[in-house]
Image: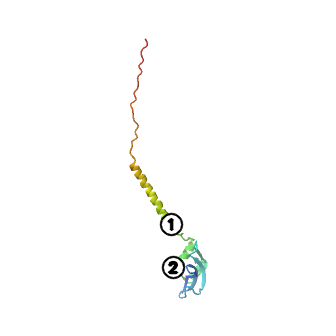
Amino acid sequence: MLKIKLARFGKKNQPHYRIVVNEARSKRDGAYTALLGHYAPTQTPKLLQIDMKEYKAWLTKGAQPTDTVAELAKRFESGTPFPPKKAKPSKKAKAKLALAEEEKAAAKKEKATAKAEAPVVAETPEKTPEVAEEVVAEPAA
């Protein structure tokens, strides 16, 4: 039975794979019948190339893809890129972030205590009754 599978190549800790058609019982990295594409997961961005015409031709001939190859082919055919990985903050960045949060919390606390300690002065304008002076006109004699 023929399998469409990944054959590993590359240096230690720097793998790249060839997508190959091979006999199911043969070695992973041994001789292969046909080369269908390449997959390099360690590159940024990840590299994925598959000859879809040949891939589909081998499927019609009865070759069975492995789960990984089937997923890669589906992803390649749909044109869906690999989701970008979120960068993990370094220890220094985490420490700076924690320090900034502490400073922010301290500033809030200080502001709240200053507000609580401040004397409460009601500023109400004093209303004084206006005394209207009446001017009495004296009659002219």
Foreground disc of the pair 2, 1: 1
Q: Secondary structure at mark 1?
A: helix
Which amino acid, mark 2?
Asp
Residue in the picture at 45% in, 60% down: 102
- Location of mark 1 (residue): 92
Q: How is the image coloured?
A: rainbow
Q: Secondary structure at mark 2?
A: helix
Look at the image and tell me in which quarter the C terminus lies.
Answer: top left
User: Residue 34's x, y, as percent?
Assistant: 60, 84
- Location of mark 2 (residue): 67
130 vs 95: above or below? above
Look at the image and tell me in which quarter the N terminus lies.
Answer: bottom right
Characterize the local packing of mark 2: few (<14), some (14-19) or many (20 or more) Cα atoms within 10 angstroms.
few
89 vs 116: above or below? below
* Label 2 with label 1: CB-CB less than 8 Å: no
Residue found at the far top of this picture: 141
User: Residue 11's x, y, as percent?
Assistant: 58, 81
The answer to which of marks 2 and 1 sits earlier in the sequence is: 2
Residue 41 in which image quadrant: bottom right
Residue in the picture at 54% in, 75% down: 74
Residue closer to the observer: 124 or 43: 124
Which amino acid, mark 1?
Lys
User: Residue 105's x, y, as percent?
Assistant: 44, 57
